[in-house]
Image (spheres, helix red, strand yellow):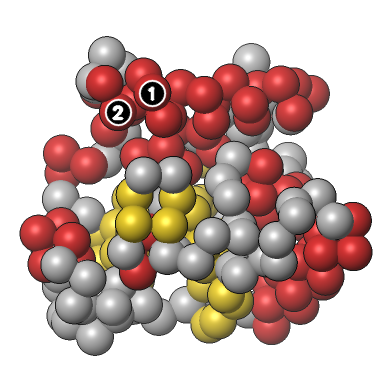
């Protein structure tokens, strides 16, 4: 008789802001090792902000996603490379037509190791001169994360025909599939 032992996967958290959270969530969910993503808000002054609050630009929050990932399948550095591949880290407080501080490029770190990895990768990408303009992505310790309203969760999966999803999220998803073809979920 064999006895099965249940083992729990030790996941890590990554909190990333690269413009609209619908797009970032939809793209990164395709990666093997990404267990779950929650869209939300971080980096501001207001407790428990709503989407309406952060859209005023007065709360200081960024639209972010909090990713739970299995580091034995996808390491933090690779996750960050995918993050940089799907947004423009050189535009301050802007991604495409979305403008405001809530759309800033930001990495909120959960450990000293994550901070060092993020800063080292930004230095590498800067040296590679991938973009003609400097990277403006900020790196800082993870503040309180506030989950967004339910209708923002899995937005693309629930609204694939929505015009914004078709025009903005779908191309980011396609780019990730092309650049990270060997790292996608089956």
Q: Could you tell me residue 126's position as x and y percent? A: 82, 64
- Indicate left or right for 46 with 26 as reference: left
**Crowd rating for badge 2 (residues with CA inside 10 Å; few <14, some 14–19, many 20+):** some
User: Distance between the Cα atoms at labels 1 and 2?
Assistant: 5 Å
**Crowd rating for badge 1 (residues with CA inside 10 Å; few <14, some 14–19, many 20+):** few
Which residue is identified by label 2?
A: 164
- Using the image as rendered, state which of residue 88 and residue 23 is in the foreground: 88
Residue at the spot 47% in from the left edge and 77% down from the top edge: 142
**Residue 66, quarter of the rendered image:** bottom left
Is 181 located above or below residue 115 in the figure? Answer: above
- Using the image as rendered, state which of residue 34 and residue 42 is in the foreground: 42
Q: Secondary structure at mark 1?
A: helix
Q: Are marks 1 and 2 in contact (CB under 8 Å)?
A: yes
Q: Could you tell me residue 73's position as x and y percent? A: 73, 41
Which residue is identified by label 1?
A: 167
Residue at the spot 85% in from the left edge and 56% down from the top edge: 129
Residue 168 visible in the snapshot = yes
State the residue lying farthest toward the front: 132
């Amino acid at each position: 008789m064999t006895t099965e032992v249940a083992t729990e996967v030790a996941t890590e958290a990554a909190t990333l802001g690269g413009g609209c959270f619908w797009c970032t969530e939809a793209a990164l969910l395709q990666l093997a090792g990404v267990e779950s993503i929650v869209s939300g808000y971080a980096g501001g002054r207001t407790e428990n902000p709503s989407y309406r609050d952060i859209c005023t630009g007065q709360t200081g929050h960024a639209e972010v996603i909090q990713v739970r990932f299995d580091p034995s399948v996808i390491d933090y550095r690779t996750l960050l490379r995918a993050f940089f591949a799907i947004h423009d880290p050189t535009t301050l407080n802007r991604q495409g037509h979305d403008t405001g501080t809530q759309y800033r490029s930001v990495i909120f770190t959960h450990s000293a190791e994550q901070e060092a990895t993020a800063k080292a990768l930004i230095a590498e990408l800067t040296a590679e001169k991938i973009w003609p303009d400097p990277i403006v992505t900020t790196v800082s310790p993870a503040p309180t994360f506030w989950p967004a309203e339910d209708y923002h969760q899995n937005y693309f999966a629930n609204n694939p025909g929505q015009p914004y999803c078709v025009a903005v999220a779908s191309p980011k998803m396609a780019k990730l599939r092309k650049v990270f073809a060997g790292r996608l979920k089956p």
